[in-house]
Amino acid sequence: MKLSKYLKTNFLIILLFIVIIAIINLILISFKTNEQAIIGVNLTAIIGFILSTIYDFNRRKKFYSKFLNNLELLDKKYLITEMIEKTNFYEGEILYDALYEIDKSMAEEIKNYSLSLVDFKEYIEMWIHEVKLPLASLNLIVHNHKELSDKKIVEQLKRIDDDVEQVLYYVRSENAQKDYLIKETKISKVISNVAMKNKDILLENNINLEVEVGDKKVLTDSKWLEFIVNQIISNSIKYIKKGVEHYIKITAKENEKSIILKIYDNGIGIKKSDIPKVFDKTFTGNNGRKIETSTGMGLYITKQLCKKLGHKVTIDSKENEYTEVSIFFNKDDFLYVAK
Amino acid sequence: MKKILIIEDDKSISKELKELLDNAEFNAIILEDFENSFEEIKKQNPDLILLDINIPSLNGEILLKKIRKESNVPIIMVTSKNTEADEVLSMSYGADDYITKPYNPTILLLRINAIFKRMENKNTVLTYNDLVIDPKKGIIKNEKEELILTKNEMIIFTFLLANRGNIVTRDDLMTELWNNNSYINDNALNVNISRLRTKLTDFGYVDTIETRKGQGYILK
């Protein structure tokens, strides 16, 4: 709070004071008052006015400076009502009460939204469980009636399942609720499930799958990790390069701090300028323009899920040569202490 | 014939599931009366139960808990609830396996067979005519000699042996291999089968694995 600005806003009061002093002086002079008395009256009035102004400025400055300072320090600005102190002047009280009211009504509004979001999430999850039933049924029908079906139907069914699953995990990744369960998980088990899901499409496209993950275990939610790995492998399958022998290589490495799962493919790669943006929502970039089914959601959801699980995910690529996605799992020292 | 009880309220799935299991030479029965599911199960006395979580009346997890109090019959949870929490819960209640919909039907059959095998394997030895098979050591032997098979060759041989006399499709073989973390391609499958044939021929078993064109393989 600046004094100059304060004086400026109180300009009229100061002007009024000067006019009053002038009128008093005029009256005193017209009544031929003693000169010393005039000076005495003037001094008293001016000093009194200055002191009262300074007092008023100071208590406001004290309150507002603290208020603004706190506001600046706060990450979540709406929490300011928790840090405001009661004041001893009227405007401050109005501000305090107003902010309190505003916050309260905003909190109610947000609560309504978050409740409707939770409802929506529950509905989506329920719907997804429902839609899996005809999918399961179709898979069985295709298997039982080989005469009226072929691999192409199975592939399209898998595509539907992948897309449905993506919606499910999008909802989960955007939601504040904690609906994952971290436990010790064998990487090879997760890879095996994902490989099995993609077996037909990998064989169909002549993509070799090389897996060297050993017996390494990580702390994660195995279903979430399965979804994440499936997203990455689906991308590898989607962006294969023509004219070479395709392969996807999955390895697991370990250093002091973490276990790193690497998924490498010799596909079309990613343009250098696109790499920093691949985890952005709805970003499709150069490769997305080549392939119609890109939504720009897969890697975004992957990143969000990793963030929630506490894993780091990075991507490295060279256009026309390779893409390598790495997932870093923290080693938890406490777990080993507990053992 | 093993009796498998299907507890699933989606009519289309249970019907197709029954067909799948019947074709695989199981005796599949569909539970009709969900109100008295527990009594019905006791009456049927199945060798294995496929249990969905979302069923009317008594929820699958509770039913599982109830069954486990009285019986050790193998139970595979087959459900669309694909969360770690549900799986952990089911396993802690004593389920033998947990499969999520939609599943690959071949995988479901493999898991069922794996459970039956686990139950019986305690004292049976795998044999083929005068050969004794030790899958864990990767060895086939007769009284005089030993033959070492690679991991993939062993998977193929034991799978053909388990289905001896029946045609095994390439797809089934592939599924079995991938299910055992051998992610091989079509060429490698050809190579493995021809190497297995050569090894068996060296052992005196000529033309034991027959190719049925467009269908698959059969172990005589």
Image: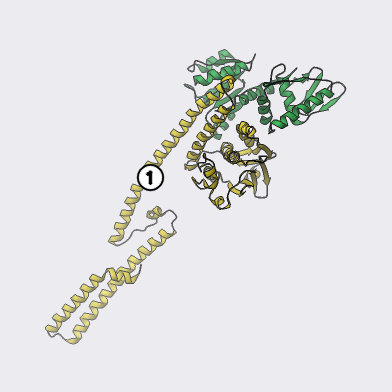
**Farthest residue toward the front?**
A243
Task: Locate the N terminus of chain B by quadrant.
Answer: top right
Whether residue A308 is visible, yes or no, is no
Front in this rendered view, residue B10 or A238: A238
Residue B23 in percent (x, y) is at: 61, 16
Quadrant assignment for the C terminus of chain B: top right
Q: The green chain is which one?
A: B
Answer with the quarter of the image where residue A210 lies. top right
Is A192 on the left-hand or right-hand side of B146? left
Residue position for label 1 = A110
Residue located 67% across and 42% down the image: A251
What color scheme is it?
A: by chain
* Residue sticking out furthest to the bottom: A35
The residue that appears at 47% across and 39% down in the rendered structure is: A171
Q: Which residue is drawn at 26% across and 69% down?
A: A10
Q: Dot 1 lies on which element?
A: helix
Q: Which of A63 and A208 is in front in this view?
A: A208
* x and y percentages locating residue B93 in the rendered image: 57, 27
The answer to whether residue A30 is left or right of residue B63 is left
The answer to whether residue B56 is above or below residue B191 is above
**Residue type at numbered disc 1:** Ile
| Left or right: where A143 falls relative to B132 | left
Position of residue B206 relative to residue A27, above or below, is above
